[in-house]
Image (tube, rainbow, N blue to C red):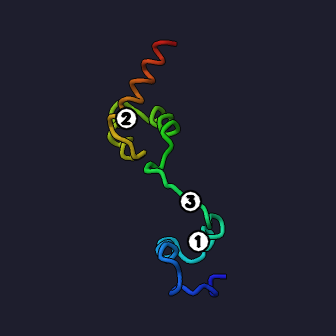
Amino acid sequence: MTENVELDALHQFYSSLNELVGTESMLNIYQHYKGTQLNFPIHLYDRKLAAKCVLQEFNGHNQHDLARKYGYSQKWVQMVVRDAKENNKKE
């Protein structure tokens, strides 16, 4: 299937995608999403799910590491931990 693709005639978007992921993957993405408007979130990880992971991994001294790992600010990590402590006090 990839041998029938004229790489020199690809649309600029698909040419860039081809360089990034390779022809076979580019064609799979094309077949699956052609005609669809896509919006890629700035964060790789979902905020609520990342917060759960942060709470599981937090050791009291790794706020910076968790912020970098999940792509959120250190202040956000502090807020997640603080909110969890406050919720535990209420229960």
Task: Report the residue at 65% width, 69% height from top.
Answer: 31
Which is nearer the N-term, disc 3 or disc 2? 3
The vertical placement of 32 against 5, above or below, is above
Q: What amino acid is at disc 3?
A: Gln
Left or right: residue 49 versus residue 27 is left
> At 56% from the left edge and 59% from the top edge, which residue is drawn?
37
Which residue has dot 3 on it?
Answer: 37
* Residue ID for mark 1: 25
What amino acid type is highlighted by mark number 2? Trp
Question: Given the image, on which type of amino acid does mark 1 rest?
Answer: Ser
Q: Are marks 3 and 2 in contact (CB under 8 Å)?
A: no
**Residue 84, horizontal then vertical, whole percent:** 45, 24
Secondary element under disc 1, as helix, strand or loop, is helix
For marks 3 and 2, give the one nearer the viewer. 3
Quadrant containing the N terminus is bottom right
Which one is nearer the viewer's eye here, 83 or 16?
16
Label 3 – label 1 distance at C-alpha: 18 Å
Residue pointed to by mark 2: 76
Q: Which image quadrant is residue 58 in?
A: top left
